[in-house]
């Protein structure tokens, strides 16, 4: 279709969308129907104005109901079918009542849904269609008949928490919950007490899920397969898989920085408990009983709560915690490790003597000495361990008729007493090592034996399916990106029509409000009002006068922040930034946060100051991207503003570029720098083009780029300067920024465009290439300014090599080529004229292929989640809600800060982090 037609369609869609709210039926009538269908004891909803009813909130215009919060009120009855006609409904919470009947459809504006612990008998399959704003779902513990996880859930692209405990689901756990699915922000997945079968989906690999609950009551054990995918779920904080039929070893948890609660009990896990679990610093609770775990009983740190591992149902070699196994047992465990510690062996291998008792399966003894290994016809897969060679008394090694892959280890030739080696009928390849004369070696029935490589006939089943899904998701997201970009283009092309040179969408030129003449560069944040208030507003904050803003911006009380930061103690200071001091905090559940306490004066005087602060925060909480530091919540204490961010354990990029020696850390390798550069470029690209509003950072520099444990980067401090109002092509501004990173036109004229950030980004690239600071006063006069010096070095390829940071270890040809490409890009970004600089999209396109060279397989498609659909409640809502034990969207009371503290104090159990929608009332059925 032609572009005109397309435009008509677009206008049509817009028209339909904009007309919808007004053509809806009367909310009051629906609410009255709801009142009528609730039976005893009922709510005293008597007034004619439904918006004045308790537990009901209206805030999108007169008479439009946005929230109904009636949890835990002993209500019975049904819900009217027409409830879906509340066209602005965002929050519906009726959990822990006695409602029955079919659950109705609700409007697609819905953001949170809590209906668990009722007697609803059915739930619409297509309920979730079009619900792109829905973030929190809790539907468990109802009276549904057996059903499958509805496919329509895939529309909930903003989903952060899905709780369906005891929801009577059957079938497989859908792949779409994983990293190849549509949920870029899913953190809580609570599927306990259902009837799922099959295993954990492969797509869980690389997902950001933090709380995974798939436990059932022992005896209902349904889920099977191994737990190996957990190894690639490094965001996990809590793993509850108990009561199932999982087999194989406990996976490696060495990259799981936040994991604190691991319940693996009542499965059929085998093998040695890995060091990575035993030494996990964040670990608080671990449950391992009733498995077939082998080797020495693990000794966890003091303070880690462990269930009674020794006395219940494992196959440890001794019952002394921290004890040792005999040498022969250690060898045998090494031997079966590459076979995945087969269950049938683990079941028979008890004690510390393979020749004791009835003897161990597969082990032939003679006179108390292991003489033979007989693993024939066992269906084992995996590879042949070189550790077999340590079994020096063994004469017969029979591994035939299995599915073994790999090669025959050279080490086996050293076995002094070996007489027979039978590896026939497997899938081995490679050269057969040369054994001593007299050893009978049978390798027949291995089609690839003697060849260099396996011919790759079998075993290529995995990956295909999920790869495909990835492609499809990628395509869909790609289309969406194009669509959004298209709409943006439409908008701007329209605006710029007739304006001479066609300007790209982000070329917004602004003329700032300037006061005075001499104050060339003031490095500050806020508004004129704030500056005026700066002097007065400091210490005089009214005692614990906690302001509660609308619930959708997550408000955290000052008491809580005080408590978790040790009353803002000196030791907790992470750093001092442009806008205030940043403190580290730790919630009782171990969640680490960074609390930014704004300089006094940042929040302006009076109601206006508060309103402005709140509205800016409201916008910032909506800007979410993988490469932007997440704003979790905020707090206003008098006129002191505090922002709560996710904690970034590896600190700022500057630490790794300039301070690594002092800090005693390793300097970054080139490929790490490259990945960081791409991460930052993607974050900034998002700010410029993809977020709902255009954000110009204006103070991009290494101290504002923070690194996670995996050295992946996120941009921080965006949006604090001032926001570019939606749809406006210009905005007034004050200068902000840091010398050395300021684009020349910005420094001189104050004109702000996205190209200001591109310039700063170019400077950051130069710093990453050279390891030198933007302004380096230790250099000779003409070399102080990095950009000037770098441009000069770039002119000459020989001098250029000397400009590369000596801390970059190996500069081989490939690295050098990559460095040169990035250097050209950096030069380009720092072009004098803004129009000569590329936009961030171009920068991403240059960097991405360079990163690909080093990282051929990204665990999840880098761009798959570039769009942020998530628009209101911060994900962290769930964490905090769990921490509070109460609903955060508490519309009836104004004292949620106190309830936060009380509920914390009342928590006897230190398992703090319950997924959302899983309130105190759930005790009868509390997920254990
Ligand atoms: C009913 O209204 C009265 C006063 O109007 C109030 O005190 C009471 O708490 C209300 N009850 C409920 C259940 O909302
Ligand atoms: C539901 O009703 C039953 C009796 O009909 C009552 O025992 C139970 O406590 C009620 N549950 C809730 C959550 O109100
Ligand atoms: C973990 O991720 C790596 C890299 O993406 C992949 O090769 C491997 O198969 C994954 N392992 C599991 C068990 O999913
Ligand atoms: C558990 O898994 C094993 C195979 O891994 C199977 O033989 C057994 O039947 C399963 N048990 C249950 C209760 O599903
Ligand atoms: C794990 O074990 C601890 C200590 O015995 C116990 O308090 C906790 O309830 C258990 N957790 C689960 C999920 O079983
Ligand atoms: C081999 O046998 C000798 C005794 O003949 C014993 O001392 C030794 O520990 C055995 N080694 C292994 C690895 O079984």
Image (cartoon, helix red, strand yellow):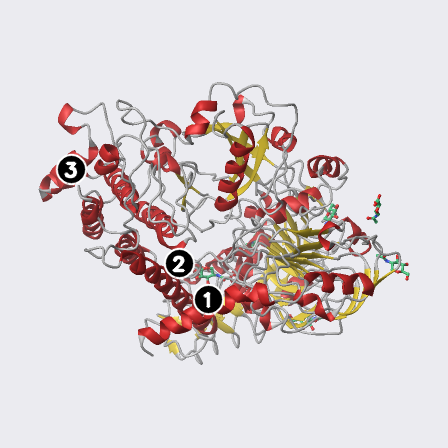
CA separation in Å, label 2 and label 3 = 33 Å
Mark 2 or 3, which is nearer the eye?
Answer: 2
* Disc 2 element: loop
Structural crowding at the residue carrying mark 3, measured as other residues with C-alpha within 10 Å and reported as few (<14), some (14–19) or many (≥20): few
Q: Where does label 1 land, which residue?
A: 14
Residue 407 can be seen, yes or no: no
Q: Residue 438: x, y in percent?
A: 43, 70
Quick check: 151 left or right of 76?
left
* Disc 1 element: helix
Query: Mark 2 vs mark 3: which is more N-terminal?
Result: 3
Mark 1 or 2, which is nearer the eye?
Answer: 1
Structural crowding at the residue carrying mark 2, measured as other residues with C-alpha within 10 Å and reported as few (<14), some (14–19) or many (≥20): few
Residue 35 figure quarter: bottom right
Q: Where does label 3 land, which residue?
A: 802
Q: Is 798 or 102 nearer to us in this picture?
A: 102
Q: Is 882 or 660 nearer to us in this picture?
A: 882
Q: Residue 191: x, y in percent?
A: 67, 62
Query: Mark 1 vs mark 3: which is more N-terminal?
Result: 1
Structural crowding at the residue carrying mark 1, measured as other residues with C-alpha within 10 Å and reported as few (<14), some (14–19) or many (≥20): few
CA separation in Å, label 1 and label 2 = 31 Å
The reply to whether callout 1 and callout 2 are in contact (CB within 8 Å) is no
Residue plotted at (72% across, 59% down): 266
Q: Is 167 or 445 nearer to us in this picture?
A: 167
Quick check: 432 left or right of 353?
left
Q: Where does label 2 land, which residue?
A: 862
With respect to residue 517, does 613 lie above or below? Answer: below
Residue plotted at (43% across, 59% down): 859
């Amino acid at each position: 279709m032609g572009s005109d037609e397309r435009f008509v369609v677009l206008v049509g869609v817009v028209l339909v969308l904009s007309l919808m709210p007004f053509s809806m039926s009367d909310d009051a009538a629906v609410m009255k129907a709801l009142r009528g269908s609730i039976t005893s004891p009922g709510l005293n909803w008597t007034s004619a104005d439904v918006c004045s009813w308790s537990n009901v909130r209206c805030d999108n215009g007169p008479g439009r109901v946005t929230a109904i919060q009636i949890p835990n009120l002993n209500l019975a009855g049904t819900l009217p079918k027409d409830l879906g006609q509340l066209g602005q409904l965002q929050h519906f919470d009726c959990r822990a009542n006695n409602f029955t009947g079919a659950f109705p459809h609700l409007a697609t504006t819905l953001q949170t849904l809590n209906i668990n612990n009722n007697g609803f008998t059915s739930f619409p399959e297509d309920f979730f269609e079009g619900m792109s704003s829905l973030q929190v779902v809790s539907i468990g513990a109802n009276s549904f008949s057996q059903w499958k996880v509805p496919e329509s859930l895939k529309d909930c692209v903003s989903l952060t928490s899905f709780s369906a405990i005891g929801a009577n689901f059957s079938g497989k756990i859908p792949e779409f919950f994983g990293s190849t699915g549509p949920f870029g922000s899913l953190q809580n997945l609570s599927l306990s007490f259902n009837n799922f079968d099959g295993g954990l989906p492969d797509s869980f690999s690389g997902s950001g899920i933090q709380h995974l609950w798939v436990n059932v009551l022992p005896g209902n054990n349904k889920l099977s397969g191994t737990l190996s995918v957990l190894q690639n779920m490094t965001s996990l904080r809590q793993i509850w898989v108990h009561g199932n039929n999982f087999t194989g070893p406990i996976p490696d948890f060495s990259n799981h920085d936040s994991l604190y609660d691991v319940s693996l009990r009542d499965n059929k896990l085998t093998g040695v408990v890995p060091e990575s679990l035993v030494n996990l610093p964040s670990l608080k609770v671990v449950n391992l009983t009733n498995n077939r775990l082998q080797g020495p009983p693990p000794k966890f740190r003091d303070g880690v709560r462990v269930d009674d591992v020794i006395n219940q149902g494992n196959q440890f070699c001794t019952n002394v915690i921290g004890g040792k196994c005999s040498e022969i047992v250690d060898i045998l465990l090494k031997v079966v490790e590459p076979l995945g510690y087969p269950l049938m062996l683990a079941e028979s291998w008890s004690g510390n003597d393979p020749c004791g008792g009835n003897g161990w399966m597969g082990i032939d003894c003679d006179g108390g000495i292991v003489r033979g290994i007989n693993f024939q016809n066992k269906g084992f897969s995996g590879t042949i361990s070189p550790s077999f060679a340590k079994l020096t008394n063994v004469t017969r090694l029979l591994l035939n008729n299995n599915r073994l892959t790999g090669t025959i280890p050279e080490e086996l030739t050293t076995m002094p007493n070996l007489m027979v080696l039978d590896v026939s009928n497997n899938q081995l390849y490679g050269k057969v090592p040369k054994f001593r004369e007299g050893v009978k070696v049978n390798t027949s029935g291995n089609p690839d034996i003697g060849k260099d490589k396996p011919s790759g006939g079998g075993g290529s089943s995995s990956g295909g399916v999920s790869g495909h899904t990835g492609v499809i998701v990628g395509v869909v997201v790609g289309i969406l990106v194009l669509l959004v970009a298209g709409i943006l283009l439409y908008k701007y092309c329209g605006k710029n029509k007739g304006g001479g040179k066609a300007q790209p969408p982000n070329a917004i030129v602004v003329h700032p409000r300037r006061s005075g003449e001499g104050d060339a560069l003031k490095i500050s944040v806020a508004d004129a009002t704030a500056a005026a208030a700066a002097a007065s507003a400091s210490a005089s904050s009214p005692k614990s006068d906690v302001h509660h803003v609308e619930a959708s911006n997550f408000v955290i009380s000052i008491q809580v922040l005080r408590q978790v930061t040790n009353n803002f103690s000196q030791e907790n200071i992470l750093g001092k930034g442009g806008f205030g001091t940043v403190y580290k905090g730790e919630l009782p559940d171990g969640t680490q946060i960074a609390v930014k306490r704004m300089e006094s004066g940042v929040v302006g005087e009076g109601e206006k100051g508060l309103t402005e602060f709140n509205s800016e925060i409201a916008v910032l909480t909506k800007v979410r991207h993988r490469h932007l530091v997440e704003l979790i919540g905020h707090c206003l204490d008098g006129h002191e503003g505090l922002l709560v961010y996710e904690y970034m354990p590896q600190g700022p990029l500057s630490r790794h570029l300039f301070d690594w020696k002092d800090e005693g850390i390793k300097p970054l390798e080139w490929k790490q720098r490259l990945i960081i550069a791409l991460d930052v470029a993607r974050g900034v690209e998002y700010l410029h083009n993809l977020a709902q509003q255009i954000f110009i950072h204006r103070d991009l520099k290494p101290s504002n780029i923070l690194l996670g444990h995996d050295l992946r980067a996120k941009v921080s401090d965006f949006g604090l300067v001032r926001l570019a109002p939606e749809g406006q092509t210009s905005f007034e501004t004050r200068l902000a920024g840091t010398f050395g990173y300021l684009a020349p036109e910005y420094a001189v004229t104050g004109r702000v465009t996205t190209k200001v950030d591109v310039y700063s980004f170019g400077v950051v690239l130069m710093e990453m290439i050279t390891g030198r600071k933007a302004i380096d006063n230790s250099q000779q006069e003409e070399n102080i300014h990095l950009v000037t010096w770098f441009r000069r070095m770039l002119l000459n390829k020989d001098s250029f090599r000397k400009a590369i940071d000596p801390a970059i270890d190996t500069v081989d040809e490939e690295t050098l080529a990559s460095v040169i490409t990035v250097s050209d890009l950096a030069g380009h970004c720092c072009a004098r004229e803004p129009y000569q600089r590329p936009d961030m999209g171009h920068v991403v396109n240059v960097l991405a292929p360079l990163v690909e060279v080093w990282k051929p397989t990204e665990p999840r498609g880098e761009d798959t989640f570039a769009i942020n659909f998530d628009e209101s409640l911060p994900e962290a809502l769930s964490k905090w809600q769990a921490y509070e034990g109460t609903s955060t969207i508490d519309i009836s009371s104004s004292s949620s800060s106190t309830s936060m503290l009380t509920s914390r104090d009342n928590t006897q159990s230190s398992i703090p982090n319950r997924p959302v929608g899983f309130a105190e009332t759930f005790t009868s059925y509390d997920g254990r």
